[in-house]
C-alpha cells in the first residue's frame, strides 16, 4: 500500500510539471464522458416518458374497430363497415377468458355550449363505466362517474375532460352544471383527471364522456345498421329500443304477436340495430394479450358468420405493442448516440497514448536514473500506467460534472425529459479507468523495457 501511495504521488508530481499539457490531454476524455452521461440521462428520461405515456393508455389495452367497407371495387378504409354491436361487446366479456373488461364506444364531434361559452372538443365519446377502468381513469379530478343504470336509461349526464372544463367553466367547478350538445342538455357529474398528450400527439383531455346510449340515440342517431329479425330477438333489453318488437323503451304492451321459429326462418325481416364505432378491451395481463386477441378474433368471426377464407370484418389494435415498439425505437436511438460518444472516448484515449509516448521520450534519462538506483521494470510500468489512469479519472470527474450540467440545461431550455442516473456515473468512472489502462499500457510497457545504460546515454 505504501508503494502505491508513493507511485501515485510521483505520478501526480509528473503531471503537475506539465499541467497545461495534462489539461489538453484530458479534453478528449472530458468530452466523451460528458456525452455518455448526457445521453444516458436523456435516454432514461425518454424511456420514463414513454412508460408514462403507456400508463395513460390503460392496462393491457386493446381496441377492436370495424373493418373496411367496399362497394364496386371502391374501398372506404378502416372503420367504415358497420359490424360491431353492443352484443359483440357483451359476448367478448362473457366468452373470452383472457379478457378482464370490455366497453362499447361511439363518438362524434360536436360543439358543447354552456351559457355564452362554447367549445368543440376533439371527441364527444359515448361508452360505459367499464371504459374508465380499461383506460385506468377511475380516479376522477372531482365528482363521480355515471353508472350502468345511466347507460340503460340513456341518462342526460356526462364527464368533462380537463380541456373542455377549463374552456367552458374557467376556474369554477363544472360539477352539477348543465351543458348542451346539439340541443341535448347534459348534467356534468364529474371531471376526468389529466392524462396529457397521447403517443400520437393528441390531447387526451379534450373530450366529453357520456353514456353510449345517450350519444347514440339522442345526440348522434344517424348511423344505423341492419340485421334480420332472428338476430335481433337475441338482443338484450338494453338494445331493443329500435326493434319492431319494442319501438320505445317505456312500451309495455306487444304491438305485434310473436312469430314462430318457422315464420322467422321463412320470412326474415330487416330491422335496425345499434352499431358501435369501437370496443375497448383490457386483457388480464400483458402475457395474455396474444390469447385475448386470438379469442376475440375467433368469437367475432363466429358471431359475424364469416366462412373460412373470408377476411375479417373487424380489426384489433394492440396499443401495448405499439408502445413497446416506440420504446424499443427510443432505446435503439440512444444506443446509436452512445456509440458516437464512445468513439469520442476512443479518440481521447488515442490522445492520451500519444502524450504518454511523448512523455516517455522526454523522460528517458529520468527513467534510466531511476533504474540505476534500484527501480525495477514493474515500478516504472506502474508509474506510467498510474499517470495514464489518473489523467483519465480526472477527465472523467470533470466530464461527469459537465454532462450533468448539460442535462440540466437541456431540460430547462428544450423541455426534454432527463433523469439523473447513478448507472451513468459508475459507467463513466469505469470507462475512464479502462481507457487509461488500455491506452496507457503500451507507453508504460515501453518505458519499463528501456535499458538503464542506454537511457542514461540518451540525449
Image (cartoon, grey):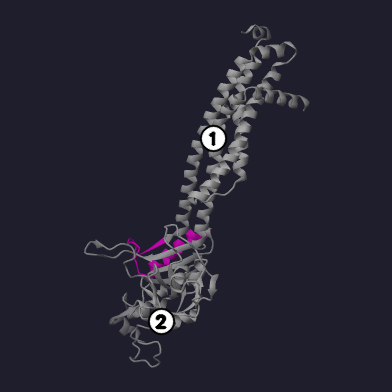
Left or right: residue 134 compared with residue 15: left
Of residues 242 and 42, the one nearer the viewer is 42
Check the picture and name the quadrant holding the C terminus. top right
- The residue where tag 2 is placed is 185
Q: Position of residue 121 (x, y in %)?
A: 40, 69
- Closer to the camera, 447 or 418? 418
Residue 202: give x, y in percent of width and height. 42, 61
Drawn side of residue 369 relative to residue 232, left or right: right
Q: Earlier in the sequence, mark 2 or mark 1?
A: 1
Q: Is residue 122 above or below residue 224?
A: above
Specify few, some or many for label 2: CA neighbours under 10 Å numbering under 14, 14-19, or 20 or more: some
Q: Is residue 60 visible?
A: no
> Does residue 183 appear in the picture of this structure?
yes
Quarter occupied by residue 364: top right
Question: Is residue 310 highlighted in magenta?
Answer: yes
Q: Quadrant of the N terminus?
A: top right
Where residue 266 sits: x, y (%)? 28, 81
The answer to whether marks 2 and 1 mark residues whose Cβ atoms lie closer than 8 Å is no
Would you place residue 152 above or below residue 69 in this image? below
Quadrant of the image occupied by residue 397: top right
Q: Secondary structure at mark 2?
A: strand
The residue most toward the bottom is 253
Residue under pointer 1: 32
Task: Report the magenta residues as a range.
Answer: 287-316
Q: Is residue 177 above or below residue 280?
A: below
| CA–CA distance in space, label 2 to label 1 | 63 Å
| Residue 208 image position (x, y, % from top left) | 43, 72
Q: Is residue 297 magenta?
A: yes
Q: Where is 78 relative to 452, above or below? A: below
Graded by Cα atoms within 10 Å as few (under 14), some (14 to 19) or many (20 or more), the crowding at tag 1 reads many
Amino acid at each position: 500500500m505504501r508503494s502505491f501511495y508513493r507511485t501515485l504521488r510521483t505520478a501526480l508530481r509528473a503531471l503537475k510539471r506539465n499541467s497545461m499539457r495534462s489539461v489538453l490531454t484530458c479534453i478528449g476524455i472530458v468530452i466523451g464522458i460528458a456525452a455518455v452521461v448526457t445521453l444516458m440521462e436523456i435516454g432514461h428520461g425518454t424511456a420514463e416518458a414513454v412508460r408514462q405515456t403507456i400508463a395513460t393508455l390503460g392496462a393491457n389495452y386493446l381496441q377492436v374497430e370495424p373493418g373496411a367497407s367496399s362497394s364496386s371495387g371502391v374501398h372506404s378504409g378502416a372503420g367504415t363497415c358497420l359490424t360491431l354491436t353492443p352484443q359483440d361487446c357483451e359476448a367478448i366479456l362473457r366468452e373470452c377468458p383472457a379478457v378482464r373488461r370490455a366497453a362499447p364506444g361511439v363518438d362524434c364531434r360536436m360543439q358543447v355550449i354552456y351559457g355564452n361559452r362554447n367549445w368543440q372538443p376533439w371527441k364527444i365519446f359515448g361508452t360505459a363505466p367499464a371504459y374508465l377502468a380499461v383506460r385506468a381513469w377511475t380516479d376522477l379530478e372531482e365528482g363521480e362517474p355515471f353508472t350502468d343504470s345511466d347507460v340503460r336509461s340513456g341518462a342526460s349526464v356526462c364527464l368533462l375532460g380537463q380541456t373542455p372544463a377549463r374552456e367552458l367553466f374557467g376556474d369554477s367547478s363544472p360539477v352539477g352544471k348543465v351543458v348542451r350538445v346539439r340541443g341535448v342538455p347534459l348534467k356534468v357529474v364529474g371531471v376526468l383527471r389529466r392524462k396529457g398528450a397521447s403517443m400520437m400527439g393528441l390531447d387526451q383531455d379534450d373530450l366529453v364522456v357520456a353514456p353510449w346510449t345517450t350519444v347514440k340515440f339522442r345526440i348522434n342517431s344517424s348511423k344505423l345498421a341492419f340485421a334480420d329479425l332472428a338476430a335481433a330477438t337475441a338482443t338484450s333489453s338494453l338494445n331493443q329500443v329500435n326493434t319492431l318488437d319494442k319501438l320505445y323503451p317505456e312500451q309495455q304492451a306487444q304491438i305485434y304477436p310473436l312469430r314462430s321459429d318457422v315464420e322467422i326462418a321463412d320470412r326474415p325481416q330487416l330491422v335496425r340495430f345499434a352499431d358501435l364505432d369501437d370496443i375497448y378491451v383490457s386483457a388480464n395481463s400483458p402475457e395474455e394479450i396474444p390469447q385475448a386477441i386470438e379469442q376475440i378474433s375467433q368469437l367475432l368471426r363466429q358471431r359475424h358468420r364469416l366462412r373460412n377464407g373470408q377476411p375479417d370484418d373487424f380489426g384489433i389494435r394492440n396499443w401495448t405493442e405499439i408502445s413497446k415498439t416506440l420504446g424499443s425505437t427510443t432505446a435503439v436511438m440512444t444506443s446509436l448516440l452512445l456509440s458516437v460518444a464512445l468513439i469520442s472516448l476512443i479518440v481521447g484515449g488515442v490522445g492520451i497514448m500519444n502524450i504518454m509516448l511523448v512523455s516517455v521520450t522526454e523522460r528517458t534519462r529520468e527513467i534510466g536514473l531511476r533504474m540505476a538506483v534500484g527501480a525495477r521494470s514493474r515500478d516504472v510500468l506502474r508509474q506510467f500506467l498510474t499517470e495514464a489512469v489518473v489523467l483519465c479519472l480526472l477527465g472523467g470527474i470533470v466530464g461527469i460534472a459537465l454532462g450533468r450540467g448539460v442535462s440540466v440545461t437541456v431540460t430547462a431550455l428544450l423541455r426534454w425529459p432527463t433523469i439523473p442516473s447513478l448507472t451513468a456515473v459508475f459507467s463513466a468512472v469505469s470507462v475512464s479507468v479502462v481507457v487509461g489502462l488500455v491506452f496507457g499500457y503500451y507507453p508504460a510497457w515501453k518505458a519499463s523495457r528501456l535499458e538503464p545504460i542506454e537511457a542514461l546515454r540518451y540525449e
